[in-house]
Amino acid sequence: MASIFNHFYQNRVALNVLANSIDNAKDIYQAAEKHVLVGVLSKDYRTTDEAILAMKAYGAAIEDAVSIGLGAGDSRQAPVVAEIAKQYPGKHINQVFPYVGQTKANTDKQDCWINSLVTPTGKIGYVNISTGPISEHAEKAIVPVKSAISLVRDMGGKALKYFPMQGLATIDEYKAVAKACGEENFALEPTGSIDKTNFTEILDIALSANVPQIIPHVYSSIIDKETGKTNVDDVTFLLQQVKKLVDQYD
């Protein structure tokens, strides 16, 4: 399987958007000029086997540029995603912090990109790592961003998935997360209420902080409410913004 890095524009930014069908995924992939990872949510399938078959079918259509999703960060899907990864890792796996190690182990020796979901805390420079199905209901484990990065690295993860950002509502915390990722040469995936109005600012913050790779997740804001499809024109717009910004920094 080809590397995920084939999908980053100038080795810096890849979009992450959802598709509701293989045809929608193909259109997205073309509009993004391959600089995209297409989210397929495990939560949308009744069984793990059904999810695996569907994701393999998506992968066959878009050069395996599949992002295996939880579904709105649902920690209950963490073991499902870990199980899917045994048979089909795609090129990008979304996972909660406590399940990164298990998911990595399940991918055997494949060099898979697994992110780690951490949440805002209201405290600049810190993130919450208790994002698992049990730990999210317990006292929060709040740690410095750089400590979270080191722990994720220990488990074999490749990026912090910062969710839910609520758009620009957590901007000061997000800036601190981006700064830490830049200093530690670690990838960042901003997620949550990102739309065409705030996308450029959110991406610019990460680029200016020298984050090596950035995967902004843009979901419901660009989905047609009637068809359920991600709007291809919006994907084109986002790619234009990516190119414009990345080219400024390179």
Image (tube, rainbow, N blue to C red):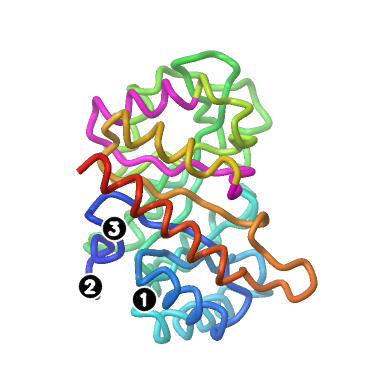
| 171, above or below 31, in the image | above
Say which label, 1 or 2, has the lower sequence index.
Answer: 2
Q: Which residue is mark 2?
A: 2
Name the amino acid type tagged 1: Asp
User: Can you give x and y, in whole percent of width and height, for residue 112 in the image?
Assistant: 29, 59
Badge 3 local density, few (<14 within 10 Å), some, or many (20+)? many
Q: CA distance from mark 3 to mark 1?
A: 17 Å
Determine the residue positioned at 31% across, 28% down.
Answer: 209
Question: Label 1, on which residue?
Answer: 64
**Labels 1 and 2 touching (C-beta < 8 A):** yes
- Which image quarter is the N terminus in? bottom left
Q: Counting residues from the N terminus, which is met first, the one under dot 3 or under dot 1?
A: 3
- Residue under pointer 3: 9
Q: Amino acid at mark 3?
A: Tyr
Question: Marks 1 and 2, Cα distance to the nearest angstrom?
Answer: 8 Å
Q: Is the residue marked by circle 2 packed among few (<14), some (14-19), or many (20+) residues within 10 Å? A: few
Residue found at the very far right of the displayed protein = 226
Query: Going 41% across and 58% down the picture, which residue do you hit?
Result: 240
The boundaries of the magenta stretch are 174-196
